[in-house]
C-alpha cells in the first residue's frame, strides 16, 4: 500500500497489442507521478527528432500518488507528449473524475504509441485493458462520444477522456476532454490523439487506492482541509469561480484587451464572476474530492453547460473585444464539445481580428463581433474556410501573412490572460516556460497580484527570478503529485511533502519535494534543447518589450527581459545560454 495503483499500461496501436508492467520504484521515487512520469517516459522513449503528429510520438496519461486518495483537491491527471503547436515536450493537466477512475481501474499511467489503422478507443477495466473499435464514434462530439461509451457498457460509473472533431482534424491546439467539460487543454494533445486514430480512453474499476501510513495520513488530510477551508482565495473561488479574477485583473490594468493592444477592458464587469453568479449560475461544481467547487454549472435560454473559467471568459471576452456574457459562454461550450483549447482558440481569433482591422488580411471580422467569433470557433474545429488556416495557431497564421509579431505567443503557444508588462515576475515565467506560453507552470500572479504567500511589487525585477524558480519547481511537483494547483493558495511545500510522505511511505521534506520538481523541470528543458530550443526562445513578443502600457498604475511599463533572464539562468545552475551545466545535471541525477 503506497497510494499507487502499481501498474502501467503500454498500448501499441500499430501492432494492436497491449502489455501491463509494474510501476517502477525509481520512477516513483524520482518523479512521483503525473507530469513527472510523463516527462521521464517521453524523454526515454521518443527521439527528439520525432514529428509530434507522426507515429513515433507517444501520449502518456498519468495520475499522481495523491490522485483519488480522497485528500481535498486530489483529482488531477496529466497528459504528456510532443506538442504539435510548439514542438516542445509538453503536458496538459485535467481534473474531474477520470484520474481517480484510471487508478481504480488499476493503472498509474497509460502509454500510447503507434497509430491504429482504424479509429479505436482503449478500455481500462479493473486491472485489465483492451483496444476496441471506435469507427462508430469517429466524427462525434465530446458529449456524444461520452454518452455513447456509457451506453455501450451500460455503466454510469465509467468515465472517458476523449477528443472531438478538432482532434480528429489535427487542429494544432485541440484538447482532450473528460466528463464533457474538463480539459487537458494546452499544447495540442488532442491532435496527437487524433493522429493516432485514438478517439477515447474509458476507465472503470473497483481497485482501492490505499495509503502507506493511515494514521499520519488522516492527520495531514484534516490539517490541509482546514487550511483550504479557511483560505480567503479558496472561499472566493467557491463563491464566484475562477472568473472572480476578471474585475481584480482589470482593475490592476493587466487584463489583456483586443489582442493585448491595451490592458484594460471598460466593460469587463459584464463578464465577471460576480455577474456570472448573478445571471447564469445554476450551481457550483467540483472535481473528485473537491471542497472548493470552483466549477460553474450555468443555465440560460434553455442551454446548460459548465463554465466559463477565467481564461475562457477572457479569451472570448476582452481579448476579442466582446462583452456579451452569453456569447462568451456559448463559445466556451462549443470548445468543450468540439475539443478545442479555449485560450488558443480565442487568442487566435483575436490575432485575426487585429490583422483584419489593420488590413493585413481580407476578412470582415472585427473586435466586438460576437456572432463572427462564434462562427470562427466552428470553422476552426472543422477546418472550414479560413478556419483551416487558424487551426494552425496564431503564430503560423500571422507569419503566413508576414506579421508574426501580432501573434501573442511564446514558443508559438498563445499567452493567457495577464499582461506581462505589469507583472515582471509573471512575464519571466511566460518567457521561460518549458511548454510555451503558459500561466500554470509558474503562477506568479499569486504573489504579484493576490498576495499569496506574500505581496510582491509587480513592477520591480529585483528578487523575481528566485520567486519564479521556486514557483516553477513547486508547480512541477504539485502536478506530479496529483493535486490541484489551486491548493497552493492555501498550502506550502511542507504540506505537500507531508502528504506525499504519508501516502507513499517515501520520506520527503520540502527541500526534497522541490528537488523532485526541479528534476522534472530540468529534464523537460534539456529535451527541448535537443529539439532546437535556446535562449532566443526565452522571450516575449516585441509588443511587450517595446510598447509601454498607456493606462493605470502600470503606465509606462514594458517587460524587462535583460534584467531578469541572466539572473534566472544563474539561479537555475544553467550557463549564459540557458543550458543546464554538467554540475546541475549530476546534482539532479539526470
Image: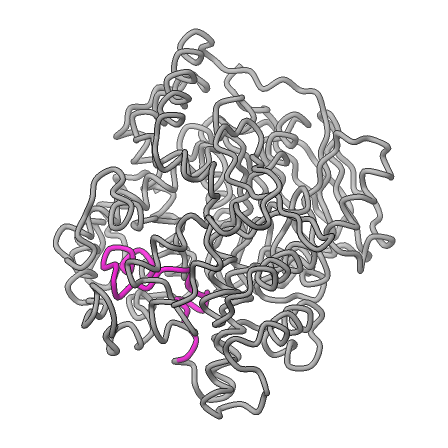
Task: Look at the image and give the residue range highlighted in magenta.
Answer: 406-430
Residue 445, position as x, y percentages in the image: 31, 50
Query: Position of 359 compared to 153: left or right?
Result: left
- Which of the pair 518/582 is nearer the observer? 518
On the rendered image, what quadrant is the C terminus found in?
top left
Residue 320, position as x, y percentages in the image: 49, 71
Determine which quarter of the picture holds residue 557: bottom left
The residue drawn where x is 16% and y is 56% is 567
**Does residue 142 lie above or below 158 as drawn?**
below
**Does residue 263 lie above or below 364 as drawn?**
above
Q: Within the magenta stretch, is there residue 340? A: no
Residue 45, position as x, y percentages in the image: 54, 48
**Does residue 91 lie above or below 219 as drawn?**
below
- Identify the residue at the far front of this view: 278
- Identify the residue at the far top of this view: 215
Query: Position of 467 compared to 167: left or right?
Result: left
- Which of the pair 529/260 is nearer the observer? 260
Amino acid at each position: 500500500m503506497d497510494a499507487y495503483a502499481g501498474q502501467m499500461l503500454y498500448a501499441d496501436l500499430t501492432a494492436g497489442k497491449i502489455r501491463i508492467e509494474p510501476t517502477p520504484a525509481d520512477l516513483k521515487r524520482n518523479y512521483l507521478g503525473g507530469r513527472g512520469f510523463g516527462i521521464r517516459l517521453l524523454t526515454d522513449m521518443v527521439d527528439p527528432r520525432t514529428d509530434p503528429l507522426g507515429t513515433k510520438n507517444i501520449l502518456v496519461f498519468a495520475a499522481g500518488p495523491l490522485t483519488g486518495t480522497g485528500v481535498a483537491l486530489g483529482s488531477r491527471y496529466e497528459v504528456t507528449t510532443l506538442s504539435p503547436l510548439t514542438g516542445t515536450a509538453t503536458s496538459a493537466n485535467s481534473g474531474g473524475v477520470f484520474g481517480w477512475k484510471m487508478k481504480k481501474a488499476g493503472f498509474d499511467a497509460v502509454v500510447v504509441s503507434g497509430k491504429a489503422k482504424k479509429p479505436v478507443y482503449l478500455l481500462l477495466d479493473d486491472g485489465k485493458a483492451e483496444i476496441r473499435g471506435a469507427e462508430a464514434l469517429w466524427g462525434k462530439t465530446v458529449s456524444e462520444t461520452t454518452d455513447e461509451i456509457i451506453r455501450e457498457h451500460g455503466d454510469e460509473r465509467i468515465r472517458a477522456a476523449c477528443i472531438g472533431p478538432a482532434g480528429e482534424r489535427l487542429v494544432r491546439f485541440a484538447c482532450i476532454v473528460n466528463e464533457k467539460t474538463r480539459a487537458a487543454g494546452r499544447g495540442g494533445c488532442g491532435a496527437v490523439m487524433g493522429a493516432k486514430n485514438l478517439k477515447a480512453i474509458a476507465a472503470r474499476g473497483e481497485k482501492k487506492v490505499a495509503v502507506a501510513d493511515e494514521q499520519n495520513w488522516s492527520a495531514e488530510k484534516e490539517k490541509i482541509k482546514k487550511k483550504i477551508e479557511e483560505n480567503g482565495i479558496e472561499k472566493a473561488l467557491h463563491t464566484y469561480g475562477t472568473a472572480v479574477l476578471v474585475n481584480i485583473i482589470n482593475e490592476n490594468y493587466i487584463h489583456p484587451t483586443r489582442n493585448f493592444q491595451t490592458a484594460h477592458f471598460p466593460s469587463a464587469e459584464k463578464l465577471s464572476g460576480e455577474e456570472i453568479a448573478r445571471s447564469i449560475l445554476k450551481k457550483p461544481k467540483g472535481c473528485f474530492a473537491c471542497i472548493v467547487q470552483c466549477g460553474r454549472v450555468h443555465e440560460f435560454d434553455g442551454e446548460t453547460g459548465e463554465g466559463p473559467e477565467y481564461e475562457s471568459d477572457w479569451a472570448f471576452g476582452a481579448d476579442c473585444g466582446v462583452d456579451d456574457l452569453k456569447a462568451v459562454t456559448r463559445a466556451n461550450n462549443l470548445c468543450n464539445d468540439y475539443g478545442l483549447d479555449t485560450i488558443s482558440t480565442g487568442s487566435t481569433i483575436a490575432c485575426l481580428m487585429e490583422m483584419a482591422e489593420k488590413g493585413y488580411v481580407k476578412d470582415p471580422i472585427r473586435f466586438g463581433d460576437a456572432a463572427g467569433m462564434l462562427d470562427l470557433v466552428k470553422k476552426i474545429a472543422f477546418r472550414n474556410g479560413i478556419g483551416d488556416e487558424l487551426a494552425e495557431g496564431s503564430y503560423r497564421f500571422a507569419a503566413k501573412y508576414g506579421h508574426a509579431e501580432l501573434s501573442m505567443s511564446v514558443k508559438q503557444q498563445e499567452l493567457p490572460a495577464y499582461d506581462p508588462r505589469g507583472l515582471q515576475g509573471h512575464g519571466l515565467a511566460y518567457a521561460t516556460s518549458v511548454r510555451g506560453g503558459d500561466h500554470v507552470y509558474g503562477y506568479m500572479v499569486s504573489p504579484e497580484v493576490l498576495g499569496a504567500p506574500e505581496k510582491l511589487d509587480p513592477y520591480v525585477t529585483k528578487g523575481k527570478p528566485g520567486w519564479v524558480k521556486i514557483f516553477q519547481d513547486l508547480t512541477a511537483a504539485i502536478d506530479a503529485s496529483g493535486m490541484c494547483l489551486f491548493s497552493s493558495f492555501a498550502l506550502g511545500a511542507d504540506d505537500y511533502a507531508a502528504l506525499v510522505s504519508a501516502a507513499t511511505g517515501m520520506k520527503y521534506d520540502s527541500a526534497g519535494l522541490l528537488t523532485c520538481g526541479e528534476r522534472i523541470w530540468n529534464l523537460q528543458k534539456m529535451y527541448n534543447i535537443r529539439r532546437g530550443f535556446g535562449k532566443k526562445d526565452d522571450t516575449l513578443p516585441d509588443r511587450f518589450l517595446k510598447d509601454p502600457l498607456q493606462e493605470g498604475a502600470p503606465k509606462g511599463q514594458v517587460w524587462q527581459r535583460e534584467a531578469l533572464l541572466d539572473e534566472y539562468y544563474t539561479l537555475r545552475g544553467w550557463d549564459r545560454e540557458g543550458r543546464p551545466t554538467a554540475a546541475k545535471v549530476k546534482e539532479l541525477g539526470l
